Every structure is written in C-alpha cells, then in structure tokens.
Amino acid sequence: MALRRASKILLVNWNSADWQLISPLLDAGQMPCLNRLVNRGTKGDLAGEFPLVSPLLRISLATGHRADRHQILGFTEPDPTTGRLRPVGSPSRKVKALWNILSQQDFRTHVIGWFASHPAEQINGVCVSDLFAKAPITPGVPWPMSPGTIHPDRLQETLAGFRLGMADLISDQLLPFVPRAAEIDQQRDPRLGLLATCLAKCATVHAAATWALEHEPWDFAAISYDLLDQLGHLFMPFHPPRREGISEADYEIYRDVMTAACRFLDMTLDRLLHLAGPEVTVLVVSDHGFHCGEGRPQGLQRESMDMASAWNRPYGLFCAAGPGILQDELIHGASILDVTPTILTLFGLPVGEDMPGRPLLASFEDPTPALPQKGSDPLKPGEGQTPFEAKSPTQPERIPSWENVIGTGGMWPPGYEEDPWETRMALDQLAALGYIEPPQSGEDQSLTESRLHQQFNLARVHIGAGCPAEAILPLEELHREFPAEAMYSLLLASCHIGCRQHDVARVLLDDVLQTQPNHQGVLLMYAEVCLSQNQPQAALSWLTRAESLAGRSETTMNWIGRAKLMLRRPAEAEAEFTDAIERNAQNPHAHLGLALARLDLDRPQEAAEAALAAVGLNHFLPRGHLALGIALAKMGRFEPAVQALRIGLSQDPNLPMAQAWLDAIDKKRAQRQRFEIPLFSSETRPEEPLA
C-alpha cells in the first residue's frame, strides 16, 4: 500500500451548499466553525457534471463514476422484479461506493443518511440508510422502523429513539428560521409544516451520526445533510434581495430561512469535529450549488424535475483541512469526480483507472505542486510558478478497477424487493418536497415518467462526458415516442452535429422550426451547425436573429465570440467573451474563448491567464489545456507548455493541434526561439461548443 496520509477521514456532504450563499455569512462571522476550517485548510469550487440532477451527482461524488456507470439516473425507477415504481436505493447502484471499497480493505466505515442507501449495506461499520430519517408527511401516521434501515441489526433499538418527525419539534425551535411564525395561517400555508419536516430529518441524521462517531470505532465516516437542498426549493425564492413577484408579506416571513439553515449546519459541523478529534482529516463538499441571487429561476413552485434542476448551479463547494492538508489555500479545477480518488489517495489506496477523476494533490502538503506566492503574477518568471512548472508530484498508485477486486464490500446482490408501504411513504415524501410528480393512482403514468427521466438523463450524461454518439440511441427512442417535444429534437440534433452528421441535424431542426419559428434553442443550434461546417458568417446571421428575439445573453455572447474568432476578428471576439465573463465569471468556456482571442492577438501572457482561469473552473477542458500550452510555448516556457499539452491530449486523444505543438516544441526548444503554428485550420477548427 502507498503512503497513508490520513489516519481518519470525515466526509460531510451539504447537498446544494454554495459559496455564493455561504461566503457572506463567513465574512459576517455567522458560520464560525466552517470559517475556522477554511482558515486552516484548502477551499475551492467543486464542479458538478452535466446534467445537474442531484441524485446523479450525489452518487457520482461517492463512487468516482459518472451516472452511465453507477446507473442512478433519477429519484425513482421501475422495480426490475415487480415492475412497480420505487425510489432508487442501494441495490440500484451498479458500482462500489467509497464505503464498499474501504470495507473491503478492512477500514472501519460509517455512512449516515446518504442518498439511495436503503437498504443499509452490510459494510465494516455502521450504515444508517436514508429511509431512517424520512418521516411521514402527515402527522399521526405510524412510523415503524423497517428491517434493513440500519446495519448492524444490534443498533436498531438504540438508534430508533433518535428519530424525529415534524410533530416532535416545538414552535420555539422554528423561530430562528421563521421569527414571525405566529402570523402564518397553517390551514392555508403548509410551508411551516414542510420546514419542520426538513429540520426533523436533518436533526435525525445528525443524531445518528454523532452517536456513531462517539460509540463505534471508525476510520472513515460519510454523512450527508440534505437541508439546504430541500429548504432551497421551498424558501430560496424569499431569500434577500426580494425579487419581483414575491409578496412583501411572504418575503418578510420567510426571508431568514436559508441563512438560518446555513448557521444550523455550521453548528452540526462543530459537533462532528469535536467528536472526530484533532487527528481527523475533514472534507466538506457539495455535489452542486444553488442559485441564491439574480440567477434564481422565476416562480415559486417547481413544475417538473427540469424546473428543479434549473435552481442548481454547476459549482458546489469544497473545503478540506487536517493533518497533511495545506492551510489557507485555494484549489482550482476540482470536480465531484475527484472526491473519491482524493480520499483513496489520502488512505494510501490505489485509484481505479476507470475513474475519470483524479486526486486533488494540490491540497496536500506533501507532495504538491508549488503554487504561486500570494500577490504575485502567477505567470511572471521569478515571481512564482504555474502549476505546470512545479516539481512533478508523486503520482497515486492505480489499479484497473475496484470493480474487479474480489468481494462486494457489503453491496447487495441484484433482485432486492422493497416493502410496498416503505415505497409508498418514500414516494409521497419525494412528491411533497417537489422532487417528483405526485404518484398517480394507476402507476402506468408514473412508471412512464420515471422511465423517460432515466433515459433522458442517461443521454445527457453521455453528452456531458463528451460522447455524443452514445447519446444518440436513447434520444432517438425518445424522439420517436414524442416527435413534437422540441427538447428531445434539439439534443438529438446537437449529438448529430457532434458526430459531424450535419444533414441529419438540419432535418431535425427544420421540423422544429416549422412549428416554433422563434424558438431560441433552434436558432442557436442552426448557428452550431454553421460553425461546425466552418460557416461563421452564416452562424452570425442565426445568432443575430436569436438576440433580436431574446436579447443578449451569456450564451449568445459565447457563440458570437466563437464565430468572430473563426472570421479572424479576434478583437471583436475578445469583447464578446469579456462581456460574457462580466455576466458570469464562472463560465469556463468564456474564459477559454478569451484565451483563444488573445492568442490570435499575440498576447500570450494574457492568453495564459485566461486559459488558467478556464481550467481552474473546469479541469476536464481539453482545449483549455491546449490553449494554455500554446500560450506558454509562445512565451518560450517549453517545459510547462509540454505538461499542459499532454494533459489536453490525455483528456482528448483526438486533439491533433496538441500533438502538433508537442512535435514543434521538441524540435525548437533547444534553440529557445519563438515559433508559430496557425491557431486554427480546416483540420483543427475548434469543435467543443463554447456555450
């Protein structure tokens, strides 16, 4: 086994936590525990995966695999044995989670409240499934604790007493969240009851977690709190500042809920760290963020799962602290797929070659690449180094796949069937909180909707992984079944464009345009076809039409910038990308476009800065590493350029320009002379969409 850097690891998932919401509270001293953790550790954004659907992301975070591998594709699924609708659970997951891998290696492991963990897996430690805290929405309904909720069975009676329902909370416990609760007519407004339900669930998870940490030996513990996600969909519309369409009365009553929820989670973290002790390495993460400012969707209620996802931001949070972790440092380019490899590396275990993420070595004291000194120009020689100029860190040990290691680590074999009462109760709660549509009296419609969501999400996972060809089959099936659904047609057209099947894409777009001539998505897709066929002027015509209908947007700015790059008008492209970044500084594709424009303007240092910003937001951006490598090579910094180009080529082997620059550097770096390779050509035209 390789070097073990952590004796104990505590992984805390605050689902939907977002630095945009939390940073002002840190500055105001309202989350002192997390603030102490940030000051003695590393922090950064944690990029989610497309699509931003919470159930997929939470399992990706815990497994290191995308949803096409782990096969959790929504909140519900058809039961393969009975055909009935059921919530996804531990038997639905097709790969090992962290707790399974660690159990196989004799680590004492606890997992509490993680999504899709019922029935509790028989791991080497304590497993409390997510069903443990799901109380009935209706007060007074019996709530027996079913077999399979807790492993080991000997803890059933002990932990049963920790469960709380909404009726167990007293009014004083709700006042920090809703100080004016007495003004609410609960016969007409059910939100106070839903708040109590969410708080009771969070308190139940926390009680089980603290008991397990205090009374059962452990090396690794994973605890998941869903409070911010559940309350966010109910109360984020009322978070300051007040938006148009929100009544002043509702705003004054519910404006404090999200701030109070963050402070409550901070107190739970303080207790966990007290029990864990000073030797623990702690990671606080979230699988995605949540819109809390101007980017919030309009409307109060979530009309569908797609509306639910519209609230999700692509960047959650990452914070790590403890022995062996750098102090008061920022980390860039982290992804939810990096969490599992990082924990395996901290424990001295190999990372699976089939895991697309990588250990976040930049957060480790030893080894770690040297970082630029604070306040210095990260690209100015003599005043700091880029991450690519530092000494190469020790590479983690790797094995082909943890799925090939003998032993299940507590995973359930296929064929598990849930109790019908448990299933109905779980479905009712998911519907009450808005995660799924209310189950129909006859289940055919609910089963159909579940199947469609799974198929649609699988296609989007393939697209997000850069595999459009694999998304075509499921999208074709959806398109045949629902030919009038523009969303399926547009995604299918995008996949055909990615496969350079432009004629097929145009047929699909023409069909949509006949019925929806002003559909902005169709106009943007026509522009993508033109760009893919090296027709930037035609693309600009479509983009201009899209802007005339819907106004300038971050998306159209990116596309217009790309078209102007291809027209060799880099100064105009730079202006477009700069405007897009002003709209959203966390758009990696806008930073990439800015890097390409500045390369064309022969400003390589500024191009390198923009490329670093792009890969700092999204490490899995092959053309970002390509642009960085080109910029560094133009500056005569050949060694870091080679490393950047090799990263880009490793992420996308079909990147001919990266290999061309590597070959040129190999020939030229002995002379240390400037040299040029055309940025674009008919063979190396940028293929990745910038929007």
Image (tube, helix red, strand yellow):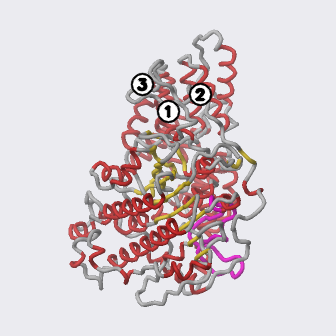
Name the N-terminal-most of marks 3 and 2.
3
Name the N-terminal-most of marks 2 and 1.
2
Q: Specify the segment rendered in magenta.
A: 71-99
Say which of 67 and 58 sits in front. 58
x then y, percent, for residue 507: 63, 53
Q: Which mark is residue 377?
A: 3
Picture quadrant of residue 239: bottom left
Say which of 15 and 437 sits in front. 15
Q: Which residue is mark 2?
A: 391
Q: Is residue 78 magenta?
A: yes
x then y, percent, for residue 671: 63, 9
Judge whether residue 383 can be spotted in this image: yes
Disc 3 marks a residue whose amino acid type is: Asp
Say which of 221 and 131 sits in front. 221
Task: Estimate how packed mark 2 is, as few (under 14), some (14 to 19) or many (20 or more) residues with alpha carbons within 10 Å.
Answer: few
Task: State how far apart marks 1 and 3 are (Cα).
Answer: 12 Å
Task: Estimate how packed mark 3 is, as few (under 14), some (14 to 19) or many (20 or more) residues with alpha carbons within 10 Å.
Answer: some
Q: Nearer the viewer, mark 2 or mark 1?
A: 2
> What residue is at 58 percent from the left and 53 percent from the top?
509
- Considering the numbered disc 3 on the image, is that residue within a helix, a strand or a loop? loop
Q: Which residue is mark 1?
A: 612
Q: Nearer the viewer, mark 1 or mark 3?
A: 3
x then y, percent, for residue 651: 65, 39
- Considering the numbered disc 2 on the image, is that residue within a helix, a strand or a loop? loop
